[in-house]
Image (cartoon, helix red, strand yellow):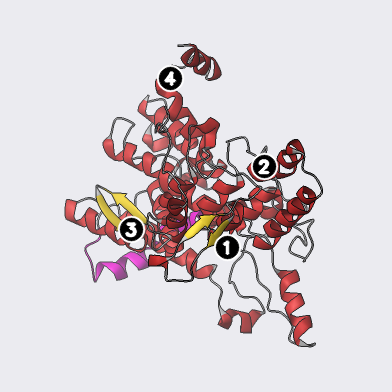
Amino acid sequence: MEQQNHRQQQHGGAPPFFDPILEYYNALPPISRAWFTLSLLTTGLHTLEIFPSNKLIFLWHRVQPPHYELWRILTSFSWAGPGTLVDFHVLILLYTMTVTVPSYEKDPHDAAQIEVPQQDGNIRDQILRRWIRRRPRHRQSDCLFAFLCCSVLILITYLMITETSTVLNVLSNYIDIPNPVLLPVFTRTLLYSIITLHSLKHPDQQHQINFFPVPGKLVPIFHIGFGVLMGYRIIETVHGVVIGLMYAILVRENEWVASMVGRKRIISTPQWLIQLAGEDGGNGNDISFDRYPGVRFEEGANALHHAAAIGDTVYIQYKIDEVESQIATSNNASDVASVTAPFRQKDRNGWQPLHEAARSGKIEVLQLLLEVDNVSNQPSESRNRMRSAGKLKIDVNARTNDDRGFTALRLAEENHGVDSDCATLLREIGGVSLGFGDETHDE
């Protein structure tokens, strides 16, 4: 009873029923949380009939002078309609937004610009130049860039199709064009763009869609096929899939582009956006151990969180060597706990470096943090692993969000599949799959 009262006080008197909901919402990464909040607010105001639909949709002639109704650009990407919060398809769209978008935000397409290294000098100099030019993953700015580019592509293609009669006339010769050909609301289209990008990033991740297990690479096709089978309108779905594919092509490394313009991507995340997101790593990939100067960490996080997320095994091994060196000179238990504490440090959401590595699928990092040794060199089906009697003392079943959230195994399963190498490793050393609302064995 005292524990329940304590939890109610933590959440402003909200009953315990809302605890998992609030925890899930607070655990959403910032871009996903902002888009979901804005969509919920916009759709809620429409449900309450405060804003009619004709004030939310994108109308090109109302955006232009002399009206300048620029808010329509924002509301057309945040209204989860047509419909209200009492409509099932609207609720499903909002739910999907909280599932797929956070997963992509945590591991978006790398859109950093890659310059073609100069070929002069000896081999050693060329290798050093490649190391110096490498940059840390700018996950938040890369995700923002994907959102911005997909939104611009959606608007451009929408205007080309709806405002240019020539395109419609050509298309009408081959297919029956519905009226309207595209809805002037783009939330669903943008969502399916992100779903497509996520499927391209994680083709082997398993999804449960309408009670069907679907591999990641087939998710867009499944949505289109299911819509056709059920007689739903699928034009916005197809539009979103096409936009996602277009963006993936634009940020893909391409040797032909490199030979033409001296860089490997047609478009890339601009430096001002990286700085705006607080992820300007400067020359942080130089081979030194002031590793991420200028990178803004989550509150409570440290450099090991970032290293685990991007798979920087060199830095992590360096820090482990530092720990072992300090432990070798002291047998004091408190000193050992102090020097190993950064490896177990929690950010404001209770995430340790272990959770970042599991979410990103960095199996080498997991092996380092959990001090796992391969006992045999047999194939994966018969491989044996065990944890050495190490010093880091990281709990493989540590949970996020005040010990009521995800374990590392659940993060690996949800982001990379139950049969992924990371999930298999964690299970072999005693990992348990737990999420919000799940009780531990000792409760």
Which quarter of the image is occupied by the N terminus? top left
Q: Position of residue 9 (x, y in %)?
A: 54, 14
Q: Position of residue 399 (x, y in %)?
A: 51, 38
* Residue identified by numbered label 4: 16
Choose top left, top right, bottom left or bottom right for residue 253.
bottom right
Q: Which residue is mark 2?
A: 301
Q: Earlier in the sequence, mark 1 or mark 2?
A: 1
Amino acid at circle 2: Ala
Label 2 sits on a secondary structure element that is: loop
Q: Is residue 79 above or below residue 49?
A: below
Q: Are marks 3 and 1 in contact (CB under 8 Å)?
A: no
Other residues around mark 4 within 10 Å, as few (<14) / some (14–19) / many (≥20): some
Q: Which residue does the numbered mark 1 point to in the structure image?
A: 110
Residue at image position (33%, 58%) is 219
Q: Which residues are magenta?
A: 150-177
Mark 2 vs mark 4, CA separation in Å: 28 Å
Q: Going from the N terminus, do you reach mark 2 or mark 3 first?
A: 3
Q: What amino acid is found at the position of numbered circle 4 in the picture?
A: Pro
Between 119 and 264, the residue placed more toward the observer is 119
First in sequence: mark 3 or mark 1? 1
Three-letter amino acid code at the position of disc 3? Val
Residue beneath the point at 64% across and 56% down: 138
Q: Is residue 119 left or right of residue 399?
A: right
Give how far apart the Cα atoms at labels 2 and 3 are. Answer: 34 Å
Q: Is residue 307 left or right of residue 177?
A: right
Name the residue beneath numbered marker 3: 219
Which of the pair 54/425 is nearer the observer?
Answer: 425
Circle 3 SS class: helix
CA gap between label 4 and label 3 equals 35 Å
Q: In the image, is 99 to the left or to the right of 34?
A: left
